[in-house]
Amino acid sequence: MKLATVKNANRDGQLVVVNRDLTKAVAVAQIAATMQAALDDWASIAPKLAEVAAALEKGAVKDSFAFDPSNAMAPLPRAYHWVDGSAYVNHVELVRKARGAQMPESFWTDPLVYQGGSDDFLGARQDVPVPSEDFGIDLEGEVAVITDDVPIGTKRAAAFEHIKLVMLVNDWSLRNLIPNELAKGFGFYQSKPATAFSPVAVTPDELGTAWSEAKVHLPLVVHVNGQPFGKPNAGVDMTFDFAKLIEHITVTRNARAGTVLGSGTISNYDRSLGSACIAERRTLEQIEQGKPVTSFLKFGDTVRIEMFDAQGRSLFGAIEQKVVRA
Amino acid sequence: MKLATVKNANRDGQLVVVNRDLTKAVAVAQIAATMQAALDDWASIAPKLAEVAAALEKGAVKDSFAFDPSNAMAPLPRAYHWVDGSAYVNHVELVRKARGAQMPESFWTDPLVYQGGSDDFLGARQDVPVPSEDFGIDLEGEVAVITDDVPIGTKRAAAFEHIKLVMLVNDWSLRNLIPNELAKGFGFYQSKPATAFSPVAVTPDELGTAWSEAKVHLPLVVHVNGQPFGKPNAGVDMTFDFAKLIEHITVTRNARAGTVLGSGTISNYDRSLGSACIAERRTLEQIEQGKPVTSFLKFGDTVRIEMFDAQGRSLFGAIEQKVVRA
């Protein structure tokens, strides 16, 4: 099934079930008022939502309405836990190579994650407010999953079943703020403004065979200002699958229901597929041409991130945003 | 007024108003079911809670009950944003000195913060589960504030009014996991298990003259296994007050209602006052005796953190926890 959250008078919006082709939705307040409420009690609520989804697909739901992605908030408009991996290690290696730094061998076996801001997620069509173009505004196209309660000490083999929903992410970054911030030693904070998510989150079964081994085996299609920018495959060169990442994040703590876990910027060794962030393209330009050529984003620039099934149908709807002055 | 959250059937518990001497409480579901609900609409809800608090103080509330700190969850049992500063820069300088490293001058003017796990906060009397004693289990005694909505770009002068509640924190750390984790460059994650909070959160006016310039001018009294460990004053040597920290965390993003903002481990230049974490004591032993003497915590060890007013009354109740095997 496919779920979304649409705007209402409340901060957490209204949970809706969306049909497969993303044209119709139905409110399910009688089952769960919000996405978080559904996740808090997923085992008993998901089957009820699935029944509504089946009925909606058959046209057997009376009070459905047209689904409008511009009226969608992030599927979880705010979350208690947003942790983002760097699962495509070749991307990390590449960026380090460009600045002449070695990457520790342990990066191939010990996942890298950071904890991001989750109190102010952006919907798929919301503008992206940034105080200054000088901050080096960049997209980061990713896949994320949402979990139920995952207890401390969960191993990879037991982690698969905790993945309840999948969605797309634009993990906006302010590249020019990163070097100083990471040099301070405590990780990202100011360099990571609000993160944006696809209009809908889907259960893994909606992905069919494209969901296997806790990876999404489909290209992430990225456009910048309407021009193709990259279409790396999220299932290729993902060093750590989502189950392994869940093992990593629960070594010393529980991950509670509604944890949003990101893949990190998708990146393939096959450079002909382009990139899912400008920083990587600039790195490749640096290596191949001696200097970066592509600029970071300016106010008014737009980014579109989407993923299609084998029949060309949009699976999650598009993240389509404009950068604006905060 | 003083507020707490007591256990019920829900993850977010039941908001209660607690009287000044922490003996009585009254549920306020008719005003706001949960602490987050109160914070989401603070301007209209706080006056109603204050009325209940005044009546409770006068003994004019019928359905009050004995307040039991062991039945309290964290005031916010889960939060959308937990960001912790290192506002006592002398502590950072000291720790660096012990390992022979220079601290950048910018640390005196540019605050250091990290974003912590907020999906699984611990109540003041909950055990602290850790997988191994080898992880270097340490307390960190701190003060934290909770804000309402703070817009991007808020300057210090406008930040004071956004501080709605104050509480105490034990920001548990796993010291032996920190070096490897920080070396990876993305900040803390596994080295920071679940954080614990005092039984009650209080409005700044409850602190009287001890609350000024967005600092709490009182000693934080720390006991380990029943023995005095430290009583550094939270108002002394705090390089960045909470208003300055709010300015820092809103440079590139909004901080939404219910943001929990910590001070970092309290530390005074006056070493006779002891420390609010074992790491600092070990650092002082290293400098003075050539090697650290005090061990990190073992399973079964207890930590008590409290703060008293001039009359010796506990302001927030005590955080009093035992470390256990996860």
Image (spheres, coloured by chain):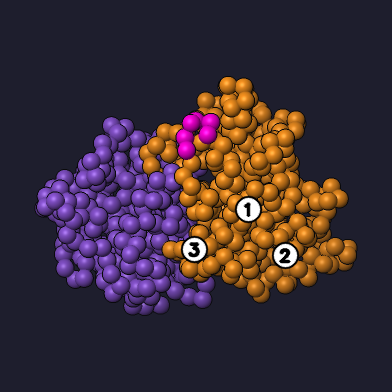
Chain colours: A orange, B purple
Residue for point 31% across, 36% down: B107
- Disc 2: which residue: A28
Q: Which mark is residue B5?
A: none
Q: Chain of mark 2?
A: A
Q: CA distance from mark 1 to mark 2?
A: 24 Å
Tell me which amino acid carries mark 1.
Ala
- The percent position of residue B73, horizontal first and vertical second, equals 41, 69
Nearer to the camera, B303 or A84: A84
Q: Tell me: B308 left or right of B169.
A: left
> Which of disc 3 and disc 1 is earlier in sequence?
1
Residue placed at 25% from the left, 51% from the top? B266
Relative to A267, is B261 on the left or the right? left
Whether residue B263 is visible to the viewer of this picture, yes or no, is yes
Q: Is residue A172 above or below residue A150?
A: above
Q: Which residues are magenta?
A: A97-102
Image quadrant where residue B212 sits = top left
**Quadrant of residue A223 in the image?**
top right
Whether residue B33 is visible: no
* Residue B311 horizontal/vertical position (percent): 16, 62
Q: Residue beneath label 3, please? A: A250
State the residue at coordinates (46%, 70%): B14
The image shows residue A60 at horizontal and vertical percentages of 87, 66
Q: Categorize mark 1 by other alpha carbons within 10 Å: few (<14), some (14-19), many (20+).
A: many
Q: Main secondary structure of the magenta part?
A: loop
